[in-house]
């Protein structure tokens, strides 16, 4: 699969560029047939085949792979490796680039040596990696993106799963624990006080004194939902209260509640409450 073609020879159909993602970049590319040599990069790469099968071959890490590349097949190429990829006809791939820092932290959290936690994999099938990849694809194709905390969550999940897909992964010792009551109160109060600002998993983890992997697990165990869903729910609650009890225009309420814009607020409220901001606002008008 020619999942590493230079941007100049590929058509970018959707991209995460300009969306403020941290540690991860995603691109959906249409790749022309032919052969391309790609030098090693300073980030780890995943190429997920999208759509109809193509006959492909690649030469990487001293090995040659010939295969019928099918929808969902994944190539994993660690940083620094170069190679040649060739397809017999046009294909489409979802290219994911994971920063070394994000991967290194995931490996450490999971008890692995970062230098030994990733190996080249070709035509890998992993349902959990696929599910994360398709969620990322939906995000970059969406006209109205989700909150960046959701992108943070997907990026972290991808890094952890990539480490887990390797050999000899150990589970974090306290993965089944819940937050201490002090940590729970601290996080809930901090989120409530900062709903109108961008929030990140790293920020919340530092506040609670936890690693990213432990924050994700313990937050869900304590609140019943992942951090990005909890934050979205609190923003919807705040927006509804402001609509009912203030005279502010909806565009301003969206910003006060931490949404990127009014459409983002409207989509979120329809999804969680089943009603639009306009419907809620009618009684006050």
Image: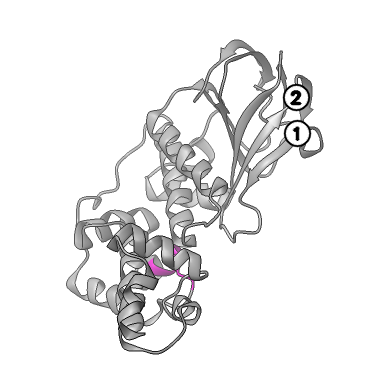
The magenta stretch spans residue 200: yes
Residue furthest bottom in the image: 247
| Picture coordinates of residue 254, whole percent (x, y) | 46, 75
Q: Residue furthest right?
A: 8
Instruction: State which quadrant residue 88 falls in.
Output: top right
Could you tell me which secondary element the residue under label 2 belongs to? loop
Q: Which residue lies under the disc numbered 1?
A: 10
Q: Dot 2: few (<14), some (14–19), or many (≥20) neighbours within 10 Å?
A: some
Q: Residue at x 39, y 57 (%)?
A: 212
Label 1 environment density (alpha carbons within 10 Å; few <14, some 14–19, many ≥20): some
Report the front residue among 151 and 210: 151
Residue at numbered disc 2? 32
Q: Residue at x 25, y 50 (%)?
A: 175
Label 2 to label 1: alpha-carbon separation: 7 Å
Residue 154: percent from the left, percent from the top? 44, 49
Kindly indicate whether the residue at mark 1 contacts the one at mark 2 (C-beta within 8 angstroms). Answer: yes
Residue 192 is at least partly visible in this image: no
Q: Say if 103 sits above or below 264 in the image.
A: above
Tell me how many marks there are: 2
Which quadrant holds residue 50?
top right
Q: Is residue 69 left or right of residue 205?
A: right
Residue, x 45% and y 69% (percent of image)? 199
Give residue 285's quadrant in the image: bottom left
Is residue 79 in view?
Answer: yes
**Is 175 above or below relative to 79?**
below
Q: Is residue 19 left or right of residue 37?
A: left
Where's the N terminus, which quadrant?
Answer: top right
**Relative depth, front residue between 261 and 221:** 261
- State the image coordinates of residue 104 (x, y, percent, origin top left): 51, 48
Local secondary structure at mark 1: loop
Start-end of magenta stretch: 198-204
């Amino acid at each position: 699969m020619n999942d590493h073609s230079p941007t100049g020879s590929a058509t970018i159909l959707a991209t995460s560029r300009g969306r403020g993602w941290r540690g991860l970049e995603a691109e959906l590319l249409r790749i022309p047939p032919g052969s391309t040599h790609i030098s090693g990069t300073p980030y780890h790469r995943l190429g997920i085949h999208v759509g109809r099968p193509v006959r492909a071959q690649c030469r990487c890490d001293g090995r040659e792979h010939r295969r019928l590349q099918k929808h969902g097949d994944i190539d994993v190429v660690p940083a620094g490796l170069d190679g040649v990829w060739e397809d017999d006809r046009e294909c489409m791939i979802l290219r994911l680039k994971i920063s070394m820092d994000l991967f290194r932290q995931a490996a450490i959290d999971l008890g692995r040596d970062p230098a030994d936690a990733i190996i080249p994999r070709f035509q890998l099938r992993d349902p959990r990696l696929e599910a994360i990849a398709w969620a990322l694809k939906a995000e970059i194709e969406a006209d109205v993106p989700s909150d960046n905390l959701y992108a943070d969550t997907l990026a972290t999940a991808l890094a952890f799963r990539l480490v887990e897909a390797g050999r000899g992964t150990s589970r974090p010792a306290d993965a089944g624990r819940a937050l201490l009551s002090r940590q729970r109160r601290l996080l809930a109060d901090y989120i409530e006080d900062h709903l109108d600002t961008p929030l990140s998993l790293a920020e919340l983890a530092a506040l609670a004194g936890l690693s990213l992997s432990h924050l994700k697990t313990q937050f869900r165990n304590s609140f019943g939902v992942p951090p990005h869903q909890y934050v979205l729910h609190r923003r919807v609650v705040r927006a509804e209260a402001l609509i009912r009890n203030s005279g502010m225009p909806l565009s301003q309420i969206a910003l006060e509640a931490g949404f990127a814009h009014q459409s983002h607020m409207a989509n979120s409220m329809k999804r969680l409450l089943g009603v639009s901001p306009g419907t809620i606002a009618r009684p006050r008008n």
